[in-house]
Amino acid sequence: MQVYLEFEKPIAEMEGKIAELRAISKDDPEVNILNEVTRLEEKVATQLEKTYKSLNPWQKTLVARHPSRPHFVDYIDHLVDDFTPLSGDRLYSDDQAIIAGLGRWQGRRVAIMGHEKGANTQARLKHNFGMARPEGYRKAIRVMELAERFNIPLVTLVDTSGAYPGIGAEERGQSEAIARCTEKCLQIGVPFVSVIVGEGGSGGALALATANRILMLEHSIYSVASPEACASILWRSREKAKEAAEALKVTAESLSDLGVIDRILKEPVGGAHRERNLVIDQVGDAVIEELDSLSHLSADELRRDRRQKFLDMGRQGIT
Amino acid sequence: MNWIKNFVRPKFESVFRGKDDTEENLWINCTECGEMIFHRDMDDLGKVCPGCDHHMRLSTKERFELLFDSSYDLVDSPEVPVDPLKFKDQKRYIDRLKDARNKTGMRDAVSIGVGDISGVETVVVVQDFAFMGGSLGMAAGEAVIRGGETALEKNCPFIVVAAAGGARMQEGIMSLMQMPRTTVIIQELRDRGLPYIVILTDPTTGGVTASYGMLGDVHIAEPGALIGFAGPRVIQDTINEKLPEGFQRAEYLLEHGMVDMVVHRHKLAETLGRLLRLLIDPQSSQAKQAVPAGE
Ligand SMILES: [Zn+2]
């Protein structure tokens, strides 16, 4: 079932009409629907193109959160052979909001980790909507250390609204876990590529995204706080999320201008959720290209490259 | 590097001076227990209530004076782009910034001082809650980095006195990026074997705790300080249940293993001095000159 976003209403209506016509012709093959369907399909294509060419930051936020947008597990299924998940932080528990493991990314040996939001109610609960607790970040640290020990390049896929704000999470040191995880990102001596595939929410995203190369899907967002949280703090109303998304400059384009991300990966017309495999393959290829571009660097050079990249951030190019 | 001796006009005045100097304005009520404290005693008390031990917030100048043995030098913080996002909510960020500067006499939330603590030359960075909630933006991040670099240059210990509601929201992603950026400088101190001590004061939450605030060799918290990742209100709204007594307070963090010690403000300088002398190995090349002769 296609899920439509609020601004896709005209598209939803036309596609509904097409489905209706097809149902009629199934019941009564005498009715000739071909012309009408073709006409409507063309209209849908035009409308999609028009809508998606000029998505505003809030609309992009909605696309980034689209329930059918490819998630971590979809990328694994399509791109990674021999995927072998590794569980647990060896300290407290296993946090399924972050999945980590080893595998072959288009044949290449990698350590891979990322947030998983879950595609249905049961999965969402299991993965806590992609909102990790300290154990998730500590598992990530453990697997990063393992990757470094065995000289395996690291790939992370970022998709979270943020780290989980709960009593247990605070009790067990959410901030310490995120701080150490970011620190570990900056420390490891293996090539490290990160892709923001959906939502990059605050420190909970950053902890997996402090990489040599940061890529971002065209309609993904990356932000210091969710537009809703920002709106409730600065506008004192969550209703102002649209304004906040605008002001926060959460889009891939803005972040590229600010020098925070390295590369934008185009999405098909109508967003990643319309042509999932196409997007997944594109991410697959882009990650390999970036890993290749880092392969000649020594462990020390990789570390230095990463540290310098972040130190330089904001020192040039912003007026 | 430019060294400046003069600092902003003391905030003490603006905070505690009443509209006129009538008798009752010379007394300050403790915000916790309501005890009346004569304003001249406040300084000697380090703004700790004699009735209930409540630790009130200190200005940057007061904090430097509390920690350093005597005189200290200020280090200029680097210039940064102002208002990188051209941010506007109900008010323009640039105007908020102007207001904060006028109100506090400071350029931004973080200041850098160099002086001796128990005779050990130390770089101290102070984050001031009075400046836009101490929030971590480009200026604050760059100041923390400059502080760390100064410690590297001087081969001496580094102390951060943290206080912040979190990120400088109006600087968006550039605020978030101060987390990895400040982490880089902490790593460089670590690589050089220079001590890095964090003092967590009321309140320290959000991106500050989730970066340099929790990466110290030693974590010291002031009594009663609110310290955490998410703010209590956010947690309350998310889980919809009552938060435990003392949740996210310094003592709670001590109990849960996140800080090494909760230290009364009257013992803070002395504790730091002792720690610094214990951490620095006078025989090693690191921070050798930091320990005075005869040790
Ligand atoms: Zn009191």
Image: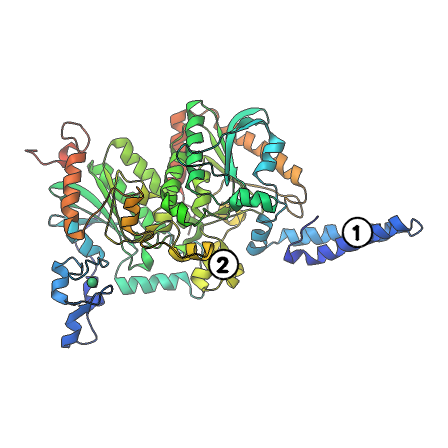
Residue at mark 1: chain: A
Q: Secondary structure at mark 1?
A: helix
Q: Residue at x 17, y 38 (%)?
A: B276
Pair 1/2: label in front:
1
Q: Residue at x 39, y 44 (%)?
A: A174
Quadrant of the rendered image holding ligand 1: bottom left
Label 2 beta carbon less than 8 Å to ligand 1: no
Can residue B132 be seen by looking at this rendering?
Answer: yes
Determine if marks 1 and 2 fall on one subunit.
Answer: yes
Residue B278 image position (x, y, % from top left): 16, 35
Say if mark 1 contacts mark 2, CB within 8 Å: no
Question: Considering only order in the chain, which callout, 2 or 1, is on the residue closer to the N terminus?
Answer: 1
Q: Residue at x 56, y 45 (%)?
A: A124
Quick check: B30 above or below B254? below
Q: Secondary structure at mark 2?
A: helix
Quick check: B166 above or below B290? below
Residue B132 image position (x, y, % from top left): 33, 59
Q: Identify the residue under disc 2.
A: A244
Q: Quadrant of residue B90?
A: bottom left
Outermost residue, left side: B294
Q: Quadrant of residue A76?
A: top right
Residue A19 numbered mark, or none? 1
Q: Is residue B50 left or right of residue A290?
A: left
